[in-house]
Amino acid sequence: MPEETYGFIGLGNMGGPMAGRLLDAGYALAVYDSNQDAVARLRARGATACASLRDVADAADTVFLSLPTPEIVQQVTIGADGLIGGARAKRVVDLSTIGPRVAALVAQVLAARGILYVDAPVSGGVGGAVRGTLAVMAACPRDHYDALEPTLKHFGPVFYLGDKAGMGQTMKLANNLLSAAAVAVTSEAMAMGVKAGLDPAVMLDVINAGSGRNSATQDKFPKAVLPGTFDIGFAARLAYKDVRLCVDEAEAIGVPMIVGAAVREMLVLTTALCGDQADFTHIAKVVETWAGVPIRQRGSA
Ligand code: NAD
């Protein structure tokens, strides 16, 4: 029996380190990205560079995706020159965040051509992708999950969400709503404290020892806001995409998301004011500007 072969499309902030972990674990990978620099980084680590999407689908049985938006995943999988027309690909493992509706659509169209779509979004940021500590939220038929689990474990702990494409996405949207809300509301609490004279580092110590602690106070603020680097590695426009998908989904199934809608608007504003390349920790920058006070480590620039 021929050996199972693997491909990876989308080698950005998340896909680059995740593909790197598979290479480090001994997997041979055929890779593609529309950005040649991203491809060159993986080729230097031992991957085989492909000239097109279709070349990956001709070379690999299983193709991983880590792409920015639902529209791009749709185009790459079931679009005119997409993976669907490839000679070899029989399983697409989508690590991107695209929402349950597009995941279900892509799964249905691929299934009609005998290709399995595995919904497998991830959470845990660039650091988690590098260290292999991401939470992987997989949804596909159980027997396929069991076969794939050892490979997914290279990215971090794997959770089985169910047999339908989109169940992993729903889980991921709920998680990212919480993650973005934490950054937004922590920005407000911290700006208020600093403007009233508190030391932001002491504030974080207190919050992290108390009931206000969250992923922003434990991770994003100490790493990217207090030092003023705003570089956690997740674009504000992608965080906006996630919260928009979440609020849209909630509305579609009749769940109120009043706080979620406010977080979504904070992310629109952040991208509008800080630019298309803004990190999602730039939400704090928007609040700082508004409040007229930087939330910065004392003694730092
Ligand atoms: P990114 O923008 O850094 O990387 C995306 C990569 O896809 C880029 O290298 C880009 O060149 C490539 N690409 C875009 N269109 C393409 C196409 N048509 N064909 C081939 N390559 C194409 O984004 P990221 O931060 O790595 O996020 C990827 C996915 O993972 C997104 O869905 C995001 O929501 C999700 N995610 C991101 C994080 C994070 O912290 N950055 C965490 C969890 C999940």
Image: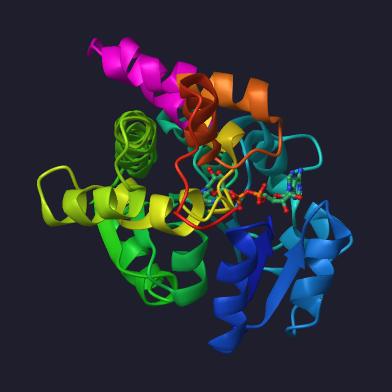
Between 244 and 79, which is closer to the camera in this rendering? 244
Q: Quadrant of the N terminus?
A: bottom right
Q: Position of residue 14 (x, y in %)?
A: 57, 59
Which image quadrant is residue 31 in?
A: bottom right
The residue sitting at 57% across, 26% down in the picture is 270
> Above or below — where is 25 with respect to 90?
below
> Above or below — where is 49 with respect to 109?
below
Q: Residue 266, can we see it?
A: yes
Which image quadrant is residue 202 in?
A: bottom left
The magenta region covers 241-265
Residue 85 covered by magenta stretch: no
Main SS class of the magenta portion in the image: helix
The residue sitting at 45% across, 41% down in the picture is 295
Q: Residue 140, can we see it?
A: no
The residue sitting at 44% across, 76% down in the picture is 154
> Above or below — where is 165 with respect to 224?
above
Q: Position of residue 109 (x, y in %)?
A: 56, 35
